[in-house]
Image: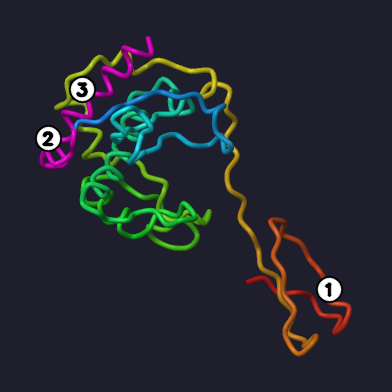
């Protein structure tokens, strides 16, 4: 079944390359890997410029967490990684050393129809500190997938237990608390994921929240 899924994803990569990337992407290895291999278990996909295979060529990894039985979700992950591939082939650094997806990734992702969800930090910015790494399919892309792509939908409905048993743990919002009184020649402040009422022991006023 995994071999069939890899074959279908390779065919989809070829078709999307024509539809969205003007045939600029090179043919690439696509592999499925178990999230248990990762230190962080939340990854859905990954683009590797140097695969480690004998030819050391590029590859796209779809992690088992992405295999939730929804073909649109799997293809969304594939397109996200294809954006990385396009940027790499054009010598564009779209991910910082800390893993943060930068504006160059955002610009290419938006240009081919991916959407970046809005968050508390404003339009097209993710609140979790990883830049623009969360992308969704736009309605236009969903229509292209449904009407223009030729692939076996049933194979892409394959479910892996990692995706079925996964419980979403959203990134918690953090609050910054500060007091207007001066301590050690500066205002005292700290952050916490919990919303609470705290009094300053120096001035006896409540901390304010940014």
Asked if labels 3 and 1 touch by Cβ distance under 8 angstroms, the answer is no
**Numbered-mark total:** 3
- The chief SS type of the magenta part is helix
Pointer 3: what residue? 11
Q: Residue 54: x, y in percent?
A: 32, 27
Q: Quadrant of the N terminus?
A: top left
Q: Quadrant of the C terminus?
A: bottom right
Pointer 1: what residue? 199
Residue drawn at 62 percent across, 51 percent down: 172
Checking the image for residue 120, the label placed there is: none
134 vs 2: above or below: below
- Foreground: disc 1 or disc 3: 3
Q: Which residues are magenta?
A: 1-26
Badge 1 marks a residue whose secondary structure is loop
Pointer 2: what residue? 18
Mark 1 Cα-neighbour bin, 10 Å: few <14, some 14–19, many ≥20: few
Sequence-first tag of 2 and 3: 3
Q: Residue 147: x, y in percent?
A: 16, 26
Badge 3 marks a residue whose secondary structure is helix
Q: Is residue 113 left or right of residue 135?
A: left
User: Is residue 5 in the magenta section?
Assistant: yes
């Amino acid at each position: 079944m995994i071999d069939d899924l890899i074959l279908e994803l390779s065919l989809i990569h070829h078709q999307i390359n024509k539809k969205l990337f003007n045939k600029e992407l090179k043919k690439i290895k696509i592999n499925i890997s178990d999230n248990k291999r990762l230190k962080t278990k939340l990854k859905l996909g990954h683009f590797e410029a140097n695969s480690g295979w004998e030819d050391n060529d590029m590859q796209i990894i779809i992690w088992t967490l992405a295999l939730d039985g929804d073909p649109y979700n799997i293809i969304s992950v594939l397109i996200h990684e294809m954006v990385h591939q396009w940027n790499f082939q054009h010598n564009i650094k779209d991910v910082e050393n800390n893993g943060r997806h930068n504006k160059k990734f955002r610009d290419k992702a938006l240009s081919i129809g991916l959407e970046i969800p809005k968050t508390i930090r404003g339009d097209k910015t993710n609140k979790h500190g990883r830049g623009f790494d969360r992308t969704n399919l736009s309605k236009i892309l969903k229509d292209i997938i449904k009407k223009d792509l030729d692939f076996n939908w049933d194979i892409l409905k394959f479910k892996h237990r990692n995706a079925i048993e996964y419980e979403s743990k959203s990134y918690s919002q953090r609050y910054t608390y500060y007091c207007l009184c001066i301590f050690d020649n500066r205002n005292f402040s700290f952050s916490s994921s919990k919303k609470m009422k705290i009094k300053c022991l120096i001035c006896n006023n409540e901390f304010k929240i940014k």
